[in-house]
Image (cartoon, grey):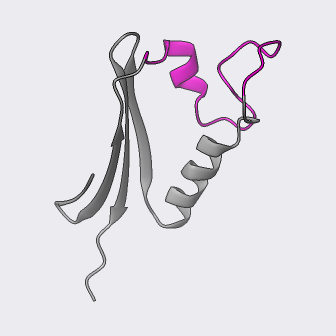
Amino acid sequence: MTKRERGYAAIVVEDNGKGMDEETKNNLFERYYRGTNTDDKTEGVGLGMSIAKAIAEVHQGKIKVETSIGRGTKLLLTFPYMHP
């Protein structure tokens, strides 16, 4: 979903999946952090969220995560709204 709020453009990505524990949430934007046991066969190397954060910051934006176990995850990206 996209929306405009108080001088900001926002992108909201939300799911109703299993959610994340506090440790995963706190490390989500760290490079190479995957939040899984490294012995598990999972896809990815843990760069996606750190890249998303870097892109947001380069555009003077912010990225925030709201999550809890069993209730899913919501990512909110906000960017200053630029008038043409």
Q: Residue furthest left?
A: 6
Q: Residue at x 31, y 78 (%)?
A: 82
Q: Residue at x 76, y 35 (%)?
A: 45
Residue 29 vs 37, above or below: the answer is below
Asked which quadrant contains residue 74, the reply is: top left
Using residue 1 as the reference point, say whether residue 73 is left or right of it. Answer: right
In the image, 3 versus 42, the foreground residue is: 42
Using residue 37 as the reference point, say whether residue 52 is left or right of it. Answer: left
Whole-percent x, y for residue 39 in the image? 83, 12
Please state, as top left, top right, bottom left or bottom right, where the C terminus lies in the image: bottom left
Q: Which residues are magenta?
A: 18-42
Whole-percent x, y for residue 3 in the image? 21, 58
Q: Is residue 10 magenta?
A: no
Residue 28 vs 12, above or below: the answer is above
Whole-percent x, y for residue 40 in the image? 77, 14
Q: Residue furthest right?
A: 39
Asked which quadrant contains residue 55, the reply is: bottom right
Please state the total of marks drawn on the protein image.
0
In the image, 62 versus 40, the foreground residue is: 40
Whole-percent x, y for residue 10 in the image? 30, 56
Mainly helix, strand or loop, the magenta region? Answer: loop
Q: Is residue 28 magenta?
A: yes
